[in-house]
Amino acid sequence: MATARQAKIFPFLWYAKDAEGAARFYASIFPRSRVERVSTMHAESPSGPPGSVKVVDFTLLGQRFQAMTAGPHDAFNDAISLTVECDDQAEVDRYWKALLQGGGREVACGWLNDRYGVRWQIVPRVLNEMMASSDVEASRRASEAMMKMVKLDVAKLEAAFEGEGGGKPAPKRRRAKARATEARARRGSRRR
């Protein structure tokens, strides 16, 4: 398995200002995270005089990232987001709250913008399993529930998937089959 330094493909984020501050903020939130190096560009560039551009190498959850402070260019937008796949509601809540600190903004469907403008999706792992379910009706109910949420709620997603809470319940046999399928999918994804 490649280490963070060996990754050949990794995200690169352009910040108008304070890429180092952003990297330190993110590293304070996620385990197995740190700022590796801050380098200064010692040449004139379209972004400014020598020393005005900084490149930051950092690791989040073992994944390599690189960021640059180089003045205004294109603002971050919804076309690219960073997804955090969470094991449970407690993890969803923890990352949601942490990334909103200092001026972040809630959006919808598990999305938020942090104080630097970066888009994040804070998603429970079980939602991906529900969306990939062979039980199309259960998957539809979970998707519809998700579309009404801001921060994702695992219990409400599971209730919708199971047909509880006002929706038409799935027949018991189909629910049991869907649960067995989801359990097999979870076991398979843990082996990878």
Image (tube, rainbow, N blue to C red):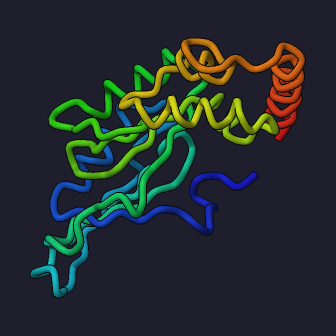
Q: Is residue 166 left or right of residue 138?
A: left
Residue sitting at x 19%, y 86%: 45
* Quadrant position of the C terminus in the picture: top right
Which of the 4 quarters of the picture holds residue 80?
bottom left
Q: Is residue 158 left or right of residue 111?
A: right
Residue sitting at x 22%, y 30%: 101
The reply to whether residue 69 is visible in this rendering is yes
The reply to whether residue 55 is visible in this rendering is no
x then y, percent, for residue 185:
83, 33
Observer-nearest of 188 and 18: 188
Count numbered badges in the picture. Answer: 0
x then y, percent, for residue 50:
14, 80
x then y, percent, for residue 142:
60, 30
Which of the 4 quarters of the picture holds residue 141?
top right
- Residue furthest left as drawn: 49
x then y, percent, for residue 105:
22, 38
Which of the 4 quarters of the picture holds residue 52?
bottom left
Observer-nearest of 32 and 75: 75
Q: Is residue 177 above or below residue 56?
A: above
Residue sitting at x 66%, y 24%: 161
Observer-nearest of 116 and 133: 133
Residue sitting at x 76%, y 51%: 1
